[in-house]
Amino acid sequence: MVNELQAQAARQRITAAYAAHEWAPHPNIDFGDLRATRKLAWAELESAGAPLDAPGQRIYLLGFVGPGPSLKLGMVTRTPSSPDNSVRQYLRSHERRAEAYRCFLVRAWISRPVRTMVRDWEQKALNAVGALDGTDRDGEYFYGADFDAAVAAAKAARKNSLAH
């Protein structure tokens, strides 16, 4: 079992390897590092949005390394009648889709549930992240986005939104 410090070091190695690498096939990485990095991202997601199965609407950001976009920002809703683990399954579907293109989850954040107007918050967050220096936007996907700056921009966008 990898502890959190080891997982953070693994994340740094994976991120640095991809940052220094051009295109395909892929940098020479340790798949143990990749697994530890993924587990850390999911642990951070669970911590930020605990409990993930609480009803409500949320904004999430998924950070990836690989030849595709570096960030996905979106919203997810869980109603009281939704099946258990529906939020986790929804986010996992984005991770699987990225993996098909050899992009790997390295960072993740999700908001606590809000009751209404999350779509307004999402639009403001998409615009705020898209306005970050060095970031190119393609719908809900971003290239060159700094994950921490994107989370800060998304959180700040909530203050200007109608979400509550």
Image: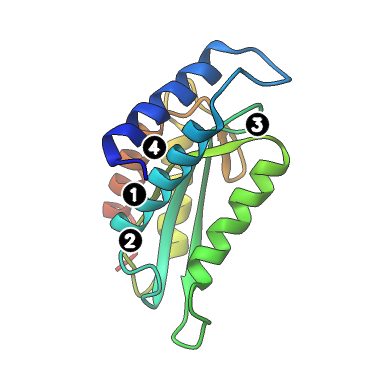
* Residue closest to the eye, 140 or 49: 49
The label on residue 126 is: none
- CA gap, disc 1 and disc 2: 9 Å
The numbered mark, 4 or 1, whose residue comes first in the sequence reads 1
Which amino acid lies under the numbered mark 1 shown in the image of this protein? Glu
The residue that mark 1 highlights is 44
Which residue is at a point 62% across and 44% down the rendered structure image?
139
| Residue mark closest to the camera, 4 vs 1 | 1
Disc 3 secondary structure class: loop
| Cα gap from disc 4 to disc 1, whole angstroms | 16 Å
Residue 121 spot, x, y in % from top left: 40, 57
Q: Secondary structure at mark 4?
A: helix
Q: Amino acid at mark 2?
A: Gly
- What residue is drawn where x is 44% and y is 86%? 80
Q: Nearer the viewer, residue 75 or 87?
A: 87
**Amino acid carrying mark 3 in the image:** Gly
Q: Quadrant of the N terminus?
A: top left
Verify CB contact (< 8 Å) between mark 3 and mark 2. no
Camera-near label (4 vs 2) is 2
Q: Position of residue 150 (x, y in %)?
A: 39, 37
How far apart marks 1 and 3 lie (CA) works out to: 22 Å
| Residue to which mark 2 is pinned | 49
Can residue 151 be seen at all in this image of the molecule?
A: yes
Viewer-side label of 3, 4: 3
Which residue is the site of mark 3? 68
Question: Is 84 rendered above or below residue 123?
Answer: below
Residue under numbered circle 4: 150
Does the CB distance between marks 3 and 4 fall below 8 Å? no
Determine crowd level at label 4: few under 14, some 14-19, many 20+ residues with C-alpha closer than 10 A: many
